[in-house]
Image (spheres, helix red, strand yellow):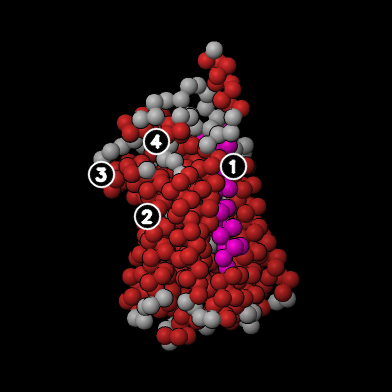
């Protein structure tokens, strides 16, 4: 009788897909928050007479804190639940951007865009997608991780052209207003439909067989101690494993070559070459469209093929495309379009295989927190590139060496990922 009941429940629509949908929309809205600095860098600097380097300093703080919050966010998800943490993240994003429209001093932007928005972004970032995929899915986990990661690309597709047109027609304040309204609009959806654990709806993770566990079991199954101490304890343990350094180092390069460099500076670099801001924002949006395809496909591939070789290909192709970018900016429009398609397919395709390798090395229980620290390395790389590229532009007058340097780092990362997860489990456990 129980077999029949289990078989019948397996044919029913699983609530995990609703949770994944709510998470997708939440990450999409948060992506608008992360896209805002790239659209506002030039008009903000022009209004307050700030150099690219000075504006980049605000953005680098935002990106760094966004990454630093990640591992603590993963521990907070376990301690307080996904829904409450997602609501807190949306509240910080909407409040930080809404108040920034009234800001007039540099320190105010540092506090609001750097710290408040950075913290909110950290609570609604890639780590959230990894936590949802690991907690709610056993089958199709790579595909779901690909879709949730791709939501950041979809956010660019939705927000960038709209914000660029609004900023051109009005002022830089139009962009934070759009993001503040979007994040507030998502909060009721999270409140009514988000659930913390499959046991809350009397189910097992998608793809697992058997009777649902006690609905109150998650209260006993997840840590109840200090989330910060747990995040730090997991970090200390992970630092003893060689693969952690390879994963974190490669993700440092990933952040430097995407969010920090292209996401922050491509519009400015295009403007330097005579390409209008709205058209450059459209270029980023097109990259977002192709990244939606590329990252989703990467999730599908990571369920079926060796993730080390996938990462080798992604980083290698990304490095070659960055070497090509300076010529594409100065050449015919078609060359820049080719770069957008090629780079867009590879933008954050690295995330699903990195998440899967993290789970293989550290196990499901610790994977989300360890991946949070790996994302922190990603954002350290992004912050480094956001500031360094601005400084290179201020000193040298263009971004060519920033693009070439990032390309070289990608080629190094392509080789560095090959040894990951090759040790036997016993050797890794004793490392």
Up/down of 185 relative to 423, above or below? below
Of tags 4 and 3, the one toward the viewer is 3
- Circles 1 and 2 in contact, beta carbons < 8 Å: no
Disc 4 element = helix
- Between discs 3 and 2, the one toward the N terminus: 2
Identified at 47% across, 71% down, the residue is 177
Of tags 1 and 2, the one toward the viewer is 2
Residue placed under numbered mark 4 in the picture: 365
Q: Which mark is residue 226?
A: 3
- Between discs 1 and 2, the one toward the N terminus: 2
Disc 3 element = loop
The stretch of residues the image draws in magenta is 137-160
Up/down of 49 relative to 341, above or below? below
Disc 1 element = helix
Q: Does the magenta-highlighted stretch encompass residue 316?
A: no
Where in the figure is residue 200, as x and y percent of width and height? 42, 34
Of tags 2 and 4, the one toward the viewer is 2
Identified at 56% across, 25% down, the residue is 9
């Amino acid at each position: 009788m129980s077999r029949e009941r289990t078989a019948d429940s397996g044919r029913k629509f699983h609530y995990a897909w609703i949770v994944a949908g709510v998470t997708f929309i939440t990450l999409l809205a948060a992506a608008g928050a992360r896209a805002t600095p790239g659209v506002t860098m030039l008009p903000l600097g022009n209004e307050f007479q700030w150099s690219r380097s000075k504006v980049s300093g605000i953005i680098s703080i935002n990106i760094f804190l966004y990454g630093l919050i990640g591992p603590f966010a993963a521990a907070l998800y376990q301690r307080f639940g996904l829904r409450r943490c997602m609501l807190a993240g949306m509240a910080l994003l909407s409040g930080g951007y809404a108040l920034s429209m009234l800001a007039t001093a540099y320190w105010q932007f540092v506090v609001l865009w750097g710290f408040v928005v950075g913290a909110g972004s950290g609570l609604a970032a890639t780590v959230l997608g990894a936590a949802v995929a690991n907690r709610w899915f056993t089958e199709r986990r790579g595909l779901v991780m690909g879709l949730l990661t791709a939501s950041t690309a979809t956010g660019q597709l939705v927000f960038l052209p709209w914000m660029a047109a609004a900023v051109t027609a009005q002022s830089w304040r139009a962009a934070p207003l759009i993001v503040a309204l979007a994040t507030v609009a998502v909060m009721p959806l999270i409140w009514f439909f988000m659930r913390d654990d499959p046991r809350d709806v009397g189910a097992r993770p998608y793809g697992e067989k058997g009777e649902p566990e006690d609905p109150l079991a998650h209260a006993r199954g997840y840590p109840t101690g200090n989330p910060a101490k747990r995040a730090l304890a997991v970090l200390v343990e992970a630092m003893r494993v060689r693969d952690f350094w390879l994963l974190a180092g490669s993700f440092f390069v990933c952040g430097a070559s995407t969010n920090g460099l292209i996401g922050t500076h491509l519009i400015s670099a295009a403007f330097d070459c005579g390409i209008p801001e709205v058209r450059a924002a459209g270029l980023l949006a097109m990259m977002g469209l192709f990244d939606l395809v590329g990252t989703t496909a990467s999730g599908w591939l990571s369920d079926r093929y060796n993730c080390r070789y996938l990462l080798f290909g992604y980083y290698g192709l990304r490095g070659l495309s960055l070497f090509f970018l300076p010529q594409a900016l100065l050449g015919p429009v078609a060359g820049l379009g080719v770069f957008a398609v090629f780079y867009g397919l590879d933008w954050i395709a690295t995330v699903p295989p990195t998440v899967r390798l993290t789970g293989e090395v550290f196990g499901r229980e610790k994977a989300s927190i360890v991946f949070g620290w790996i994302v922190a390395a990603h954002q350290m790389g992004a912050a480094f590139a956001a500031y360094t590229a601005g400084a290179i532009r201020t000193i040298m007058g263009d971004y060519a060496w920033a693009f070439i340097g990032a390309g070289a780092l990608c080629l190094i990362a392509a080789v560095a990922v090959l040894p990951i997860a090759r040790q036997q489990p016993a050797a890794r456990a004793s490392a």
